[in-house]
Amino acid sequence: MSDLNLTLHVWRQRNAKSPGKMVTYKVTGVSTHASFLEMLDILNEQLTAKGEEPIAFDHDCREGICGMCSLMINGRPHGGQRATTTCQLHMRHFKNGDEIWIEPWRAEAFPVIKDLCVDRTPFDRVIAAGGFITANCGSAPDANDILIPKESADDSMDAAACIACGACVAACPNGSAMLFVAAKLAHLHRLPQGQPERMHRTQAMVTAMDAAGFGNCSNHYECEAACPKDIKRDVMALMNRDYAKAALASRDRETKSDGSG
C-alpha cells in the first residue's frame, strides 16, 4: 500500500491558562504500517524541520499497557476501534486524503496542560484513597496459602486489566469515572485478601472520586464501549451495592456513637 497524505486538525493550547484552538496541518509520507503515535512523530519531525513548535502529546510504553496515549480521534476516545488504545491504532484504518480531528480528553476533572496533554492526577488521588490492600510485610507467601476459585480469580484479573487511561471519563456525557473506580474496586473485592477493608475502601474511593469533580453515571454506557480493555459495566453495579452497604454501616456507627441509637 502507498504512503498516506493526511489533513490533521489538532488542538493546540500553550498552557492551562491560555485559550486553545484547532490548527490544521498537512502530514505527508505516512506508512500504513505506522501507528497513530508514529504518525504524530512524523508530523512533529516535519514541524521541527520548519522551525515550528512540535505538538505535545502523552505516550510511554506504546504497547497498550500504560494508558498514557489519551487522545480523542474524530470524536472517539482512542479512535473508536474496539479494545484498542491510541498507540495500537494503525494508519491502515485511514485512507489517503483523510481529514482527522485530534483533541485531548474533554472532562472538567482532566484540565488541559498543553496541547493534547491533560492532568489525570485525580485518578492518582482516587487510588491513594483506598486502591490497595493493607498487609504486614514479610517473606512472600506460598501461592496456595489462600485458595481462590477460578471464577473469582478470572473476574479479578478482568477488572485489573484497567490501565487508567481515562477513556471512560472522556466518553461519558457527565465526565463520570465510575467505570475506572469500579474496576479498581472489583479487582480487589473479588479476592479474599480484599475483604477486610472492602467497605472502607469503597466509601473512601467513591468519596475521593466525587471530590475530584467527576460526574455521575449517565447510564449511556459509552464508558464500556470506549474502554480499550473491555471492562464490563457489571463492575459498576458491584460498586453501587457495596457503597450502599458502606454508607448504611457508616450511618449506623454514627448513630451509636452519638447515643441516639
Image (cartoon, rainbow, N blue to C red):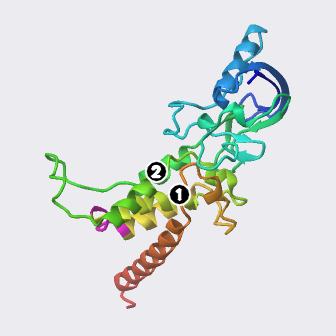
What number is the disc on residue 231?
1
Q: Is residue 47 visible?
A: yes
Q: Can you tell which quarter of the image residue 53 is in?
A: top right
Q: Is residue 16 visible?
A: no
Judge by depth and name the residue closer to the eye, 197 or 86: 86
Query: What residue appears at the point 62 percent right and 54 percent down from the top-left corner?
Result: 168
Q: Residue placed farthest to the front in the image?
A: 1
Q: CA distance from mark 2 to mark 1?
A: 8 Å
Q: Is residue 199 magenta?
A: no
Residue 88 in percent (x, y) is at 59, 36
Q: Can you tell which quarter of the image residue 121 is in?
A: top right
Q: Residue placed farthest to the bottom in the image?
A: 261
In this rendering, the answer to whether 138 lies above or below 214 is: above
Taking the image as shown, residue 243 lies to the left or right of residue 166, namely left
Residue 177 in percent (x, y) is at 59, 57
Query: What residue appears at the point 53 percent right and 56 percent down from the top-left corner?
Result: 180
Whether pointer 2 and pointer 1 mark residues with C-beta atoms closer than 8 Å, the reply is yes
- Residue type marked 1: Ile
Judge by depth and name the residue closer to the eye, 164 or 17: 164
Residue 233 in percent (x, y) is at 56, 65
Residue 10 in percent (x, y) is at 79, 32
What number is the disc on residue 161?
2
Taking the image as shown, residue 62 lies to the left or right of residue 45, namely left
Q: Residues within 10 Å of mark 2 (few under 14, many from 20)?
A: some
- Residue type marked 2: Ala
Quadrant where the N terminus sits is top right
In this rendering, the answer to whether 149 lies above or below 110 is: below
- The magenta region covers 193-198
In the structure shown, which secondary structural element does the residue marked by tag 2 occupy? loop
